[in-house]
Image: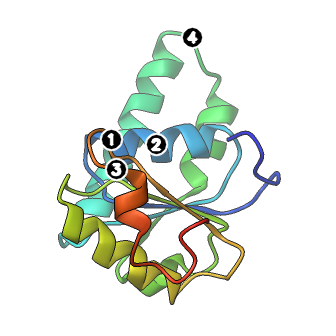
């Protein structure tokens, strides 16, 4: 997570395959991770899956137990979107639907600090179009 202050909180919205992968990378990089998904229980299930992946890395001797425990401890499920407020970086990893992403990012603008970075994990939508309705699209 280059450019982000050490220990800065990262939020990931969307706990599917991509979102949980991003959460794992951020946690292993030393960041507290706030994971939210609109589906009830999805964030908790994703964290359990991440811990299983970390366990496999330990079994293959690609990660030591202390690093596994530290990364797992950095992962926190959120039950409501407003729980991501402390994050300095928010990465959305929801469904590839323009209006859903625009609504989410607009809501996040009202939740996180004015200097928080809002990012998208889109693979096919224009960043400019996604950000067009935001008060501060440059962030």
Secondary structure under badge 1?
helix
Where 40 sits versus 6, above or below? below
**Mark toward the start of the polypeptide (3 vs 4):** 4
Secondary structure under badge 3?
loop
Looking at the rendered image, the quarter that the C terminus falls into is bottom right
Q: CA distance from mark 2 to mark 1?
A: 6 Å
Q: Name the residue beneath numbered marker 4.
A: 61
Task: Indicate which label's residue lies in the foreground, 2 or 4.
Answer: 2
Secondary structure under badge 4?
loop
Q: Is residue 114 left or right of residue 112?
A: right
Task: Indicate which label's residue lies in the foreground, 3 or 4.
Answer: 3
Q: Are marks 2 and 1 in contact (CB under 8 Å)?
A: yes
Q: Residues within 10 Å of mark 2 (few under 14, many from 20)?
A: many
Res. 22 mark:
2
Q: Position of residue 50 (x, y in %)?
A: 39, 41
Res. 18 mark:
1
Res. 126 mark:
3
**Residue drawn at 66 percent across, 45 percent down:** 70
Q: Quadrant of residue 14?
A: bottom left
Task: Indicate which label's residue lies in the foreground, 3 or 1.
Answer: 3
Where 84 sits versus 49, above or below? below
Q: Is residue 106 left or right of residue 11?
A: left
**Mark toward the start of the polypeptide (2 vs 4):** 2
Secondary structure under badge 2?
helix
Asked whether 87 or 118 is in front, the reply is 118
């Amino acid at each position: 997570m280059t450019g982000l202050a050490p220990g800065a909180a990262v939020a990931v919205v969307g706990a599917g395959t991509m979102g949980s992968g991003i959460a794992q990378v951020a946690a292993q990089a030393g960041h507290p991770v706030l994971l939210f998904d609109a589906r009830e229980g999805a964030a908790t299930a994703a964290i359990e899956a991440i811990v299983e992946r970390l366990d496999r890395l330990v079994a293959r001797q690609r990660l030591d137990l202390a690093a596994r425990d530290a990364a797992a401890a950095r992962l926190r499920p959120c039950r409501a979107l407003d729980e991501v407020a402390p994050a300095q970086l928010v990465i959305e990893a929801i469904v590839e639907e323009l209006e859903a992403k625009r609504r989410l990012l607009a809501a996040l603008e009202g939740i996180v600090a004015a200097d928080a970075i809002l990012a998208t994990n889109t693979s096919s939508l224009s960043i400019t179009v996604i950000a067009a309705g935001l008060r501060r699209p440059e962030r």
